Image: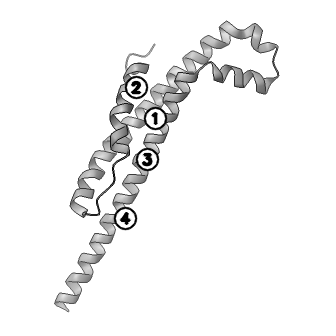
């Protein structure tokens, strides 16, 4: 087992902590947006790591379940066997999906922050041009 992989309980705990931040309503104040974007970049990186860790746990569980359930699985049609094995990894699937969704939410928030910052720059340019020109 890898030593730098977070346990499932550590993953869940960290995702719970980040959930609040993923649900934040962003201000349109450029200074606040810049600060938020800096935080969101950290959360984006952490959730990417949590995705990898969740996938690791899912893969280990799948390997274990395939070994344990091989006789049952071989009696099923391939698509049914896949669904059966997937159903045995409920917690691992949940953590993986949650981490993926948070990662995507932070990526969208960073994109939104970039838009707000660009808008503020254009407004500043326009204001500077009208007052000096």
- Percent across and percent down for residue 17 are 33, 33
Badge 3 marks a residue whose secondary structure is: helix
| Residue 11 occupies quadrant | top left
Image height check: is 32 above or below 130? above
Q: Is residue 15 left or right of residue 94?
A: left
Q: CA distance from mark 3 to mark 4?
A: 15 Å
Residue 74: numbered disc: none
Q: Residue at x 67, y 13 (%)?
A: 66
Badge 2 marks a residue whose secondary structure is: helix
Q: CA distance from mark 4 to mark 1?
A: 25 Å
Q: CA distance from mark 3 to mark 2?
A: 17 Å
Q: CA distance from mark 2 to mark 4?
A: 31 Å
- Percent across and percent down for residue 80 are 77, 24
**Which residue was labeled with disc 2?**
11
Could you tell which of marks 4 and 1 lies nearer the N-terminus? 1
- Quadrant of the frame with the C terminus: bottom left
Could you tell which of marks 3 and 4 lies nearer the N-terminus? 3
Could you tell which of marks 3 and 2 lies nearer the N-terminus? 2
Q: Are marks 2 and 1 in contact (CB under 8 Å)?
A: yes
**Which residue was labeled with disc 1?**
99
Could you tell which of marks 3 and 1 lies nearer the N-terminus? 1
**Which residue was labeled with disc 4?**
115
Could you tell which of marks 2 and 4 lies nearer the N-terminus? 2
- Percent across and percent down for residue 28 are 29, 63
Badge 4 marks a residue whose secondary structure is: helix
Q: Residue at x 32, y 56 (%)?
A: 26
| Residue 21 occupies quadrant | top left
**Colour mode?**
one colour
Q: Are marks 3 and 1 in contact (CB under 8 Å)?
A: no
**Which residue was labeled with disc 3?**
105
């Amino acid at each position: 087992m890898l030593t730098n992989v977070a346990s499932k309980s550590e993953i869940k705990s960290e995702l719970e902590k980040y959930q609040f931040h993923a649900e934040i309503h962003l201000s349109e104040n450029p200074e606040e947006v810049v600060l938020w974007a800096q935080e969101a970049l950290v959360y984006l990186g952490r959730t990417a790591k949590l995705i990898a860790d969740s996938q690791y746990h899912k893969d280990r569980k799948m390997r274990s379940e395939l070994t344990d359930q091989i006789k049952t699985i071989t009696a099923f049609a391939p698509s049914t066997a896949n669904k059966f094995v997937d159903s045995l990894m409920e917690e691992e699937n949940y953590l993986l999906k949650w981490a993926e969704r948070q990662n995507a939410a932070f990526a969208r928030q960073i994109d939104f922050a970039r838009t707000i910052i660009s808008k503020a720059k254009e407004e500043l340019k326009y204001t500077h041009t009208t007052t000096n020109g």
